Amino acid sequence: MEKICRLYKHLQIPYSEAFDTARAKTCRYFEIDQKNMESEIQKGLVWL
């Protein structure tokens, strides 16, 4: 399953372009979902 920015149409990113997480660092629309991030970290810590 490929990931794509939800704003790809608004940002004029071609649908066929490879997903690049580094792009988020410079995207003015990017926001970290703190609650979701902490939940995912906790899930990872359970497996340690």
Image: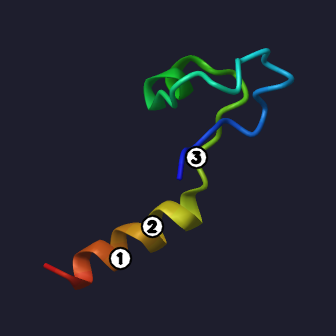
Residues under numbered marks 2 and 3 in contact, where contact means CB atoms less than 8 Å apart? no
Q: Are marks 1 and 3 in contact (CB under 8 Å)?
A: no
The relative height of residue 14 versus residue 34 in the rendered view (above or below) is: above
Badge number at residue 38: 2
Q: For mark 3, what is the residue?
A: 32
Q: As displayed, is residue 5 above or below residue 47? A: above
Q: Nearer the viewer, residue 18 or 37?
A: 18
Q: Nearer the viewer, residue 13 or 46?
A: 13
Amino acid, disc 3:
Ile
Please tell me which residue is depicted at 58% across the width and 46% down the height of the picture.
Answer: 32
Mark 1 and mark 3: Cα distance apart in space: 16 Å
Please name whichever residue, 3 or 34, is drawn nearer the observer in this view of the structure. 3
Q: Amino acid at mark 1?
A: Gln
Residue 47 located left or right of residue 10: left
- Residue kind at label 2, given as amino acid type: Glu
Q: Which mark is residue 42?
A: 1
Residue 31's x, y, as percent? 64, 40
* Quadrant position of residue 46: bottom left
Q: Position of residue 29 (x, y in %)?
A: 73, 29
